[in-house]
Image: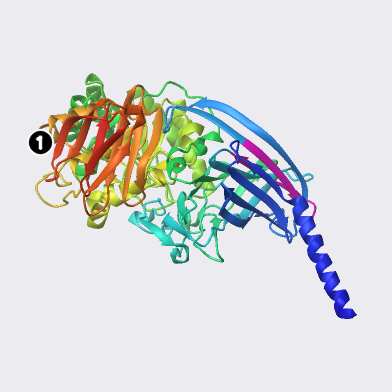
């Protein structure tokens, strides 16, 4: 009798628990109905799951924060839920497309902890994108809190493989400036093998077996919060992790201080059956707004840059004149003058150099060391950007002498203190009519839209490592085939490419041999999106590369009205189409060891005669006119470590 009673009680408890969970489970779907998020509280813990076309893309994964005013990770109970819609359009001239229509359905799910303090989970779901964040209301008289950690998780189905770049160990690397988002990638890796000690940077790409693809990232991080990253794979999932204490020489909190009511940044999840939504997503910009107005209309474009190939020894007046002349000959808008200019050229002579550049219709970007106390980077100008007093004094001079932009280097951390420095530099620069590129830096998280004068970040294993590392030169094509699907999918990427020397040094006769073709280099000018591009051309290229390559670079846009995924697989090859006005550029690269013949579908160019920049079997550059089929198909053979560009 007791056994029967116990069994009945057990069944009753199961039914009661199931009914309670069903009552607090809320869902929101995309406008087209294919993408769904379900949110619930189970055993006192908030969780969510993601389904696409009735396939599980993320299994039940945890939600929650720990603050100094309360724990919101356990003993939670459901309070309320509401739904809504968003339909907005905006224009943005610095991202992969210039006009965006964003439509999403929303769910606000409110819960409380055992102390009765509320937290809300805000979800916005568009046809291929999910953005979610936490809202912390004002609790009584409490007006501020510190978010100490986050348990947000991503639990993928077992068939998933990962494409990830590891977080660098703090206070390592050159002059103890790490982390700076300059690691390599693992591709198609089993989740159990992704055990990097310090986790993985955003964004992270995942192949969900045969069900499709997921891209994880975050956006909306400014002075309001810290930058986060993914943990390594443990307990069956990845979680959101905050910066390590060792970053920035141990200065600053690892958490975030926010006023109440307040919001965390957005976590973003892009989902697709194919890679097309991954490449074409605009979610990093859809859910943020400009934080201030541009002080003027900023001009984007291309620039010459001596340091990348000619290095430190080029920091003298005579060599910079050569690079001004190079920029003028190429119809480039800018020259970037890099480290040591203050010591080796000097402020007085720099004014003369700026005047000379302007006489050639070339404007100037100047390099600065961001550092004051957070690492050991020693290049000058130093101690000019890390304090408000020094920064405003320097920027006043920059404006007076006609400098148009800054490249600020060596940040090395994602703490809220560092995010404030990024924002302070941008705000002050805008007040003085200056654009800003960041180098040795973190991922830009919606900054193209948030900050009108932000024009790009490195945050990638970029062109300088092609100069320094044989291993990176050998993997150049491999990395290039990844960036459209991962790093460059969520933010502008200032790579500093287009290297046409056969040897990546001043002599161009022996040494660091370039292993990719000229057509590959031209293709990366299209594949890598950034509104201001500083290219690695050298003065000798004006006479030692084919004229048609130089003409291509003279005409190449740096801003785009539309971006379309054509074909590819990360780590193997990639083909994208970008449109500027009425002109189309279709570019591809091949990272595999043998030539690859592609039949590509170009519906926008049906029956049209187009220019094809490609490599012959001897890997020499060619230019020919070809006709796209009436069905929009064109067959192109791409050499190993080669590339192509189609223009119309």
**Is residue 119 shown to the viewer in this render?**
yes
Residue under the image location 10 percent in, 32 percent down? 543
Left-right relation of 564 to 545: right
Q: Is residue 91 magenta?
A: no
Q: Main secondary structure of the magenta part?
A: strand
Q: Where in the figure is residue 263, as x and y percent of width and height? A: 64, 42
In this image, 481 relative to 226: left or right? left
Q: Residues within 10 Å of mark 1 (few under 14, many from 20)?
A: few
Task: Look at the image and tell me in which quarter the C terminus lies.
Answer: top left
For the record, the magenta segment spans 105-125
> In the picture, residue 105 is in which quadrant?
top right
Q: Is 89 rendered above or below residue 62?
A: above
Which residue does the numbered mark 1 point to in the structure image? 544
Whole-percent x and y of residue 44?
A: 74, 59
Residue shown at 81% from the left, 70% from the top: 10
Looking at the rendered structure, the secondary structure element under dot 1 is helix
Q: Residue 15 is drawn in which quadrant?
A: bottom right
- In this view, the residue farthest toward the front is 631
**Residue 118 on the magenta span:** yes
The image shows residue 353 at horizontal and vertical percentages of 23, 27
Nearest the viewer among 620 and 3 is 3
- Residue 258 in the figure: left or right of residue 348: right
| Colouring method of the image | rainbow
> Is residue 433 found left or right of 624 in the rendered image?
right
Q: Nearer the viewer, residue 137 or 430?
A: 137
Give the quadrant of the N terminus. Answer: bottom right
Q: Is residue 339 above or below residue 603?
A: below
Question: Residue at 44% across / 66% down in the picture?
Answer: 193
* Point 75% across, 46% down: residue: 142
Asked whether residue 290 appears in the rendered view, the answer is: no
Percent from the top left, x then y, of residue 45? 70, 58
């Amino acid at each position: 009798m007791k056994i029967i009673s116990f069994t009945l009680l057990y069944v009753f408890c199961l039914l009661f628990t199931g009914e309670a969970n069903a009552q607090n489970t809320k869902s929101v779907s995309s406008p087209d109905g294919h993408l769904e998020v379900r949110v619930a509280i189970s055993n006192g813990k908030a969780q969510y799951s993601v389904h696409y076309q009735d396939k599980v893309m993320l299994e039940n994964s945890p939600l929650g924060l720990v603050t100094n005013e309360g724990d919101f990770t356990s003993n939670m109970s459901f309070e309320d839920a509401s739904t809504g819609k968003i339909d907005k359009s905006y224009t943005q001239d610095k991202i992969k497309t210039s006009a965006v229509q964003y439509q999403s359905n929303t769910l606000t799910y409110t819960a409380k902890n055992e102390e009765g303090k509320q937290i809300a989970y805000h979800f916005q779901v568009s046809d291929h994108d999910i953005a979610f964040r936490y809202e912390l209301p004002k609790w009584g008289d409490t007006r501020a809190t510190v978010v100490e950690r986050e348990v947000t998780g991503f639990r993928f189905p077992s068939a998933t493989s990962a494409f990830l770049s590891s977080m660098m160990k703090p206070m390592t690397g050159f002059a103890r400036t790490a982390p700076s988002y300059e690691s390599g990638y693992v591709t198609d890796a089993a989740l159990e093998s992704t055990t990097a000690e310090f986790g993985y940077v955003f964004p992270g790409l995942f192949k969900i077996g045969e069900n499709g693809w997921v891209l994880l990232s975050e956006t909306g991080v400014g002075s309001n919060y810290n930058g986060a990253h993914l943990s390594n794979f443990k307990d069956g999932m990845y979680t959101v992790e905050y910066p390590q204490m060792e970053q920035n020489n141990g200065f600053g909190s690892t958490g975030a201080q926010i006023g109440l009511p307040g919001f965390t940044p957005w976590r973003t999840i892009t989902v697709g059956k194919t890679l097309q939504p991954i490449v074409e997503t605009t979610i990093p910009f859809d859910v943020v707004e400009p934080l201030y107005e541009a002080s003027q209309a900023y001009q984007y474009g291309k620039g010459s840059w001596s340091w990348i190939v000619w290095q430190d020894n080029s920091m003298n007046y005579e060599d910079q004149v050569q690079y001004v002349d190079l920029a003028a000959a190429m119809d480039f808008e800018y020259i970037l003058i890099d480290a040591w200019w203050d010591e080796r050229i000097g402020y007085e002579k720099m004014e003369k150099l700026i005047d000379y550049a302007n006489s050639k219709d070339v404007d100037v970007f100047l390099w600065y060391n961001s550092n004051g106390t957070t690492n050991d980077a020693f290049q000058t100008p130093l101690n000019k950007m890390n304090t408000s007093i020094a920064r405003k004094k320097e920027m006043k001079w920059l404006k007076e002498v006609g400098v148009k932009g800054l490249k600020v280097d060596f940040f090395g951390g994602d703490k809220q203190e560092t995010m404030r420095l990024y924002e302070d530099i941008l705000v002050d620069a805008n007040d003085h009519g200056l654009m800003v590129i960041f180098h040795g830096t973190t991922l830009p998280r919606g900054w193209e839209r948030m900050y009108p004068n932000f024009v790009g970040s490195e945050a990638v294993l970029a062109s300088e490592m092609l100069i320094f590392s044989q291993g990176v030169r050998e993997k150049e094509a491999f990395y290039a085939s990844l960036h459209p699907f991962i790093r460059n999918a969520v933010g502008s990427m200032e790579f500093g490419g287009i290297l046409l020397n056969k040897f990546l040094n001043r002599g161009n006769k022996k040494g660091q041999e370039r292993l990719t073709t000229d057509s590959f280099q031209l293709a990366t000018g299209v594949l890598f999106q950034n509104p201001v591009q500083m290219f690695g051309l050298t003065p000798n290229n004006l006479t030692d590369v084919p004229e048609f390559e130089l003409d291509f670079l003279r005409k190449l846009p740096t801003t785009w009205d539309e971006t379309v995924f054509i074909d590819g697989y990360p780590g193997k090859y990639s083909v994208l189409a970008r449109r500027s006005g009425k002109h189309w550029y279709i570019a591809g690269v091949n990272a595999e060891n043998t030539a690859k013949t592609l039949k590509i579908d170009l519906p926008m160019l049906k029956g049209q005669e187009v220019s094809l920049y490609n490599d012959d079997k001897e890997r020499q550059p060619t230019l020919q006119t070809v006709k796209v089929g009436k069905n929009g198909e064109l067959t192109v053979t791409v050499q190993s470590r080669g590339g192509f560009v189609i223009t119309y």
